[in-house]
Amino acid sequence: MPDDALLTSLLSAVEAAPGDVPLRLHVAELLADRGRLPEALAHCTQAITHDAANPAALALLHRLTSAISTPEPPVFDWTSAEEQVADIEPPEFAHVEDPAPAPTIEDIERPTVTLADVGGMEQVKERLELAFLGPMRNPQLAKAFGKTLAGGLLLYGPPGCGKTFLARAVAGELGARFYNVGISDVLDMYVGASERNLSQIFDAARRNAPCVLFLDEIDALGQKRSHLAHSTSMRNVVNQLLSEMDSLGGAGDGVFVLGATNHPWDVDNALRRPGRFDRMLLVLPPDAAARASILRYHLRDRPVAQIDVDKIVRATEHFSGADLAHVCTTAAERGLAASMRAGQLRPLTTADLEAAVREIRPSTGPWFSTARTVTAFGNADGSYDDLAAYLRKNKKL
């Protein structure tokens, strides 16, 4: 059908340009019109992740969450049904078991990566060790100093800067399993199903302890309830998340909760209280050492000539890890085109990478623009002092 072909084409376009907010909102509208509300909500949430103040995205979010929380009742023809069963003799007794809840899909892995596999980012790794890993490895020593092991760690920063990889490396450091949970694993269009999904997820983490439970896009799962006045279902999801966090007893459960967000200022304040996500760690764009490591990683299986990696590193300050991967892919496309024209393989050169860098702008720019406003007007409690210090050093951002 033409409409379905159009939607398929638009979905492919979104995959190729995930940061195109108008395109993603258009796709969300089309999905909503077709009754595919969870998919529409996922795209709308991604749009808000890239542009938190977009009025069209916020309006669509309210409409979708309201529609999900109040599904239309099905129309049932009772008269016809009674006629169909009128001649059936009922049994003497009948007992129907309550249907068992659908089991949670436990996509749980045991990572082999550790912080040693994270290139550069020494300050982040040091903070992780002091604020999170050290006390977990030395529970008796932490107890002697009155350090509680309850609560979680919230990783925040621009998109594409390695928060998920860091969380996986934390699991590797602890020798724990890793359970990566996204918004699509939780939200469900049926009333009460999202809360049940969250409960099953935390239960699954306990069954697989020791386990690092990683809640991605926590600003969507735990967004400020003051923004959800017209969405009872989403408010209930936040309440359920608060309850599940309170149910953990620290390292005694063997469940270590990490969250990640690009917009910590949209997270409900109650989730930031002691015993919940009471520690925050800023994950910035990769430093020079990390950029060199990322570039070498993405060039490792491609034909390359002598490449001046340091030169590319100097030209890509403030690029995210995802931006650097895009640089390598764009350079590879140039090399492939040149090889096809020449009729023989031509390795990638420094010039190919430099040309790719000139075509690509760092995706972190819009995030830092928003962050500068937050640090100027919303940092009364000092939560974003690290971010404010970074912005003072990089006034051109």
Image (cartoon, helix red, strand yellow):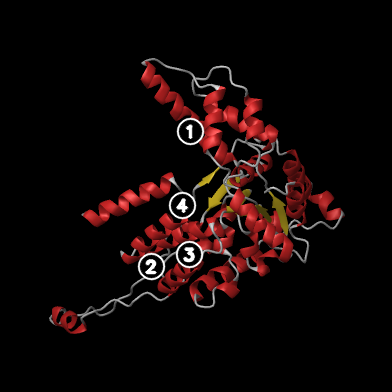
List the residue tagged with mark 2: 99
Q: Taking 191 as reference, is 167 left or right? A: right
Res 241 quadrant in image: bottom right
List the residue tagged with mark 3: 57
Q: Is residue 152 visible to the viewer in this orientation of the structure?
A: no
Dot 1: element:
helix
| Res. 358 mark | none
Pointer 1 or 4: first along the chain: 4
Position of residue 295 measured from the top left corner of the image (x, y, whole percent):
59, 30
| Res. 330 mark | 1
Q: What residue type is labelled 2?
A: Pro
Residue drawn at 56 percent across, 56 percent down:
217
Q: Distance between the residues labelled 2 and 4?
A: 42 Å
Position of residue 64 measured from the top left corner of the image (x, y, whole percent):
43, 69
Q: Residue furthest top?
A: 344
Q: Which amino acid does label 1 sit on?
A: Thr
Look at discs 3 and 2 and give the one toward the viewer.
3
Residue drawn at 31 percent across, 50 percent down:
8
Question: Which is more toward the observer, 378 or 220?
Answer: 378
Pointer 3 or 1: first along the chain: 3
Q: Which residue lies furthest to the right in this view?
A: 145
Near mark 4 (Cα within 10 A), the count class, few <14, some 14-19 or many ≥20, is: some
Pointer 2 or 4: first along the chain: 4
Position of residue 130 measured from the top left corner of the image (x, y, whole percent):
79, 47
| Res. 20 mark | 4
Pointer 4 or 3: first along the chain: 4
Q: Distance between the residues labelled 1 and 4?
A: 18 Å
Res 205 quadrant in image: bottom right
Near mark 1 (Cα within 10 A), the count class, few <14, some 14-19 or many ≥20, is: some
Dot 4: element:
loop
